[in-house]
Image (cartoon, coloured by chain):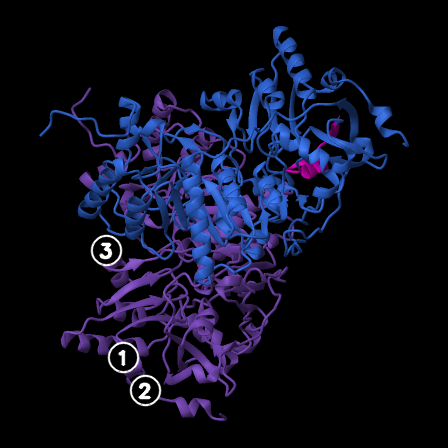
Chain colours: A purple, B blue
Amino acid sequence: MLNLIQSRLMSAEDVAERLPTRCTIATSGFTTGYPKVIPGAYARKLHEAQERGEECGFNLYTGASTGDELDGVLARTNAMKKRLPFQSTPDVRDRINRGEIEFLDIHLSHVPRYIEHNILDPIDIAIVEAVDVTPEGRIYLTTSSGMTPTYIKYAKEVYIELNRHHPMGLKGYHDVFLPQLPPEGRPIHITHTDDRIGVSYVACNPTKIKGIVETNLPDAGHEFKSPDSVCTRIAEFVLDFILFEISKGRIPAQYLPFQSGVGNIANAVLACLAQDDRFHEIEMYTEVVQDSIFDLLDADKLRFASTSALTFSSEGTARLHREIDELRAKFVIRPQEISNNPEVIRRMGIISMNTALEVDIFGNVNSTHVLGSKMMNGIGGSGDFARNAYISIFMSPSVAKRGDISAFVPMVSHVDHNEHSTQIIVSEYGLADLRGLSPKRRAQEIIEKCAHPDYRDMLRDYLDTGLRHAPGKHTPHDLRHTFDWHLRFLETGSMKYTPTTEA
Amino acid sequence: MLNLIQSRLMSAEDVAERLPTRCTIATSGFTTGYPKVIPGAYARKLHEAQERGEECGFNLYTGASTGDELDGVLARTNAMKKRLPFQSTPDVRDRINRGEIEFLDIHLSHVPRYIEHNILDPIDIAIVEAVDVTPEGRIYLTTSSGMTPTYIKYAKEVYIELNRHHPMGLKGYHDVFLPQLPPEGRPIHITHTDDRIGVSYVACNPTKIKGIVETNLPDAGHEFKSPDSVCTRIAEFVLDFILFEISKGRIPAQYLPFQSGVGNIANAVLACLAQDDRFHEIEMYTEVVQDSIFDLLDADKLRFASTSALTFSSEGTARLHREIDELRAKFVIRPQEISNNPEVIRRMGIISMNTALEVDIFGNVNSTHVLGSKMMNGIGGSGDFARNAYISIFMSPSVAKRGDISAFVPMVSHVDHNEHSTQIIVSEYGLADLRGLSPKRRAQEIIEKCAHPDYRDMLRDYLDTGLRHAPGKHTPHDLRHTFDWHLRFLETGSMKYTPTTEA
């Protein structure tokens, strides 16, 4: 047992050889930290089997999004049957929207329960990226936690990619704790962002570890773009709002922990927080930390960040490696069962900031579906945070496609966050505070504060027609015309009215 | 101070005299336990003021629904401006749907936070029903807790209706505990339905208690109807499902606590649980307990019920009064901040059962809006429970209005519980298990298991058209025809196709 690693060392092809062509595979990976060579070898094996006429088919479970080395190569085998709970790779997305892959779009905090409660197809194989494994089976993960502890616990066999790209200093970044299942559930004792309640490794019966592959590969870069003016405007509205709330006594003067989604707007908010002299001592309780966290560090404003993944660009990763010992006091990486847990989110009073794809005038938010039918990426953790946050903020540029799509519409074509759970909506034109407003008042607020000026008259028209003709005036929808904008876009390429010869 | 009650005794008219004609009033009441005479006196005062040409206007906050003695009389003054968070009185509903009352339809567990976080108009007056008040200001509530502890805490002035209809033996039924606000949030130490973490009264500074009115009045009866065959069929599907889940190891053999919504279907489930020899030792963690709980008691099957209200018929209340000392070991009444708390619901693993108004083929549930615009009652606690439950079940008869309305439609006209949070859908035709299914497969399951046979071909048509024409095949909606059914009902009185002369 003393030399577990050496006794199990093999090549990616050796592992692929052992994997069945029909199975359920669960991997590490939550933006980063996914396996990078075994999937490619497995894909080649599947292609060969398919050439021999063999029917192949596998399910893929991950923490959240991964890179082309996992999702891309496996999707292109056309043997991916079921995929959960989130994805952002073009090859996977295309196959979902062609109806070829069954995609389960699940709240990230629900995935562990679906596994533990024996609801999904059981996991045959777990493939996880690690920096080290001890003879006792202590697995030290790389830059993400996500679903990995749960997948290792429930998988029949575990394969490990030991990624030498990362320093051993990553040990100690993780806090691995999985709550007991009902009826044995007990409180989760996190009351501050930096509380640690678990251990720094995932415990695994070493006999389950069937193979170890050494690699030395970075994650696909999450390159950092400087915020554009639209994102910066949105960020400024958010920061002014937070200070206003403090002045009203609704947010304590020392703030509350922030959650921030993935992407350019989220990056802009953190970049602006770093630059703005009115803010100090920021704490994050979030699922993903991006390069913008370094702006906070450099401004000496980051007290602590709890996350489920470090999602850095190649420069960010290089800096993490250089400062690996200093940064350990600033970060903790938690399983998504904990990072996204409603109990902890509600208790700590998180300020949640997520991006919307589409918002309707009554405050319903679409985060996932283009034109009501096409999957973009998935709901991810946005529902976990928004539903239990102290304040839930949804942000979106007012228009897309050079103005031909309005983010603010009469009715969203898919609801991921409904009017009962949304509070603050922000575009580059302004911030709508929906709290304490009836649907009609929300509509006025969203139209006048957030919608692009080109679309305001059209939205006012829709609301007026509803107020005249709807069977009820509580949420005055005109069901004859709810999706006219989407249909017009499909027909003409623009949501705007096209001039007609009618009077 | 020794005789607080006598020193503050006055008539309902005396209280009304002291209440301003423009103010925010918060009352006790969560189906039962609402004040019954002060509102009437206040309504008479408002009518008189209006006759003198005075402009009157007040906001009304409660725990949930109340009776005509509160909501009805006050709505009929036409001076009710804002109402939250739930209602079920015709006079209030009509005025909401005429656009006269601003109704805030809020998750019940969010209401305390909206008050505590200083988001809603501040409370001027609290009016609460109690069985006793001590000189120190300990207020012992009647049959509901709801929002009352929070309203008493934040109101500037408190008036009490001491209702002599109830015995002093109600003392001890309540467990009053309000969590600390962020950043001081701490775990809520409830791990079993019968855990008590608070005190049996609401503490109030006695100087805030400005008047006490003695009454002797029952709540408006919540009369209990024997379950009809549709409700019984639904209940049987639910019970069979629970036993199936136990056989699969997905629910522990000793079950998990049940939450059950208000109404006939919920009553039928409990009545069937009582009759079914396969079930023993039931626990409830819910917001409302109805007469059907006595069936469980009589069958010696109720281990314990945690609730926010006892919602009994007049016979049920009489029995409660007769057995007040024995029943104290079986019930606890908690504030809605605790009965509906996501932390506790998730930890204990609640089996949540709520009624749907409308369900679409992709699994989205409408609990609140008729034809997308008319408010029925409100979301209540259904979202608090469904979102964090171990298993969330939504139940509905397949049709309404003698078959002219299908509960199962292409797209719901309002989303209260979205596809990410719904799991089990039940009608009198069958049970659809949506867990682990992509939207397309969910649609097949709902159409073939739950929809009324008269509507199945129409739903299959919709799905087929979507699969051919939708821009994406993940959720194959046909936005041209999403609301044809609702529009047809508005035009013809039926959702069914009407025969036409077209080929």
Q: Which residue reaches farthest left?
A: B503
From the viewer's side, name the closer residue of B54 and A61: A61
Sequence-wise, which precedes: disc 3 or disc 1? 1
Mark 2, residue position: A11
Taking the image as shown, residue A71 lies to the left or right of residue B316, namely left
Q: Nearer the viewer, mark 3 or mark 2?
A: 3
Hey, what amino acid is under mark 3?
Gly
**Tally of numbered tags:** 3
Q: CA distance from mark 3 to mark 1?
A: 26 Å
Taking the image as shown, residue A94 lies to the left or right of residue B287, namely left
Hey, what amino acid is under mark 1?
Ala
Q: Which residue reaches farthest right?
A: B2
Mark 1, residue position: A41
Whether residue A495 can be seen here = no
Residue B436, image x, y percentages: 36, 57
Q: Please, what secondary structure does the residue beneath circle 3 have?
A: loop
Hey, what amino acid is under mark 2?
Ser
Sequence-wise, which precedes: disc 3 or disc 2? 2
Residue at position x 28%, y 32% in the image:
B485
Residue B213: which quarter of the image? top right
Residue A187 against residue B28 in the figure, above or below:
below
Give the extent of the magenta segment.
B145-162
Q: Nearer the viewer, mark 3 or mark 1?
A: 3
Mark 3, residue position: A99
Chain of the residue where label 2 is placed in the rendered structure:
A
Q: Are marks 3 and 2 on the same chain?
A: yes
Residue A125, image x, y percentages: 37, 75
